[in-house]
Image (cartoon, rainbow, N blue to C red):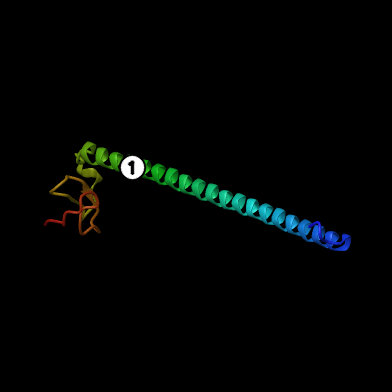
Amino acid sequence: TDDLTPEQRAVLAQIRQKQEEREKKEAEEKAQKQQAQQAVAAETAYQNFWVQRQMASLMSLYQQGHALQQERKTAAPPPTAQSDYWEGDWTCAKCGDHQFARNRECRNCGAPRTK
C-alpha cells in the first residue's frame, strides 16, 4: 500500500468502505432472518400448545359426558307405571328402558325389539 498513489489509496479506501457496508448489511439481514425464524418457531410452538390444550379440554368433556351417560344407564330404573305407555310402546328386555312404538331397537343399549 506504500507504493500506491493518493488516488489509488482513495479508491482502495472506497472499496474497503463498500465492502464493510456490504458485510454490515449482510449481518443485519442475517439477524433479521434469524429473528423471523425465531418468531415463526414461537408461533408454531404456541399453536401446538393451543391445540394440545384444546384436545385435552375436549377429551375431558368427552370423558365426563361418557361417565354421565354410564351413570344414567345404570341409575335409570325401568318405568313402573304403565300409564306412561302408549299403545305399541315396549320395554327393552336387556336394560328395561321404556321405548316408544316407533323404535325398532333400544335407544339406550341398542338391543333389538322383542315381541
Give the vertical position of 12 relative to 75 (above or below).
Answer: below
- In the picture provided, is 45 more to the left or to the right than 76? right
- In the picture provided, is 112 more to the left or to the right than 28? left
Which class describes the residues within 10 Å of circle 1: few (<14), some (14-19), or many (20+)?
Answer: few
> What residue appears at the point 65 percent right and 52 percent down from the top-left corner?
32
Outermost residue, front direction?
3
Give the vertical position of 56 relative to 2 (above or below).
Answer: above
> What residue appears at the point 33 percent right and 42 percent down from the top-left corner?
65
> What residue appears at the point 75 percent right and 56 percent down from the top-left corner?
21
Type of the residue with mark 1: Gly
Question: Residue 6, image x and y in percent?
Answer: 88, 60
Outermost residue, right direction?
6
Element on which disc 1 rests = helix
The answer to which of 5 and 59 lies nearer the viewer is 5
Q: Which residue is mark 1?
A: 65
Quarter where residue 5 is shown: bottom right
The answer to which of 105 and 4 lies nearer the viewer is 4
Quarter where residue 58 is shown: top left
Question: Residue 112, image x and y in percent?
Answer: 16, 57
The answer to which of 34 and 71 lies nearer the viewer is 34
In which quadrant of the rendered image does the C terminus lie? Answer: bottom left
The answer to which of 107 and 18 lies nearer the viewer is 18
- In the picture provided, is 88 more to the left or to the right than 59? left
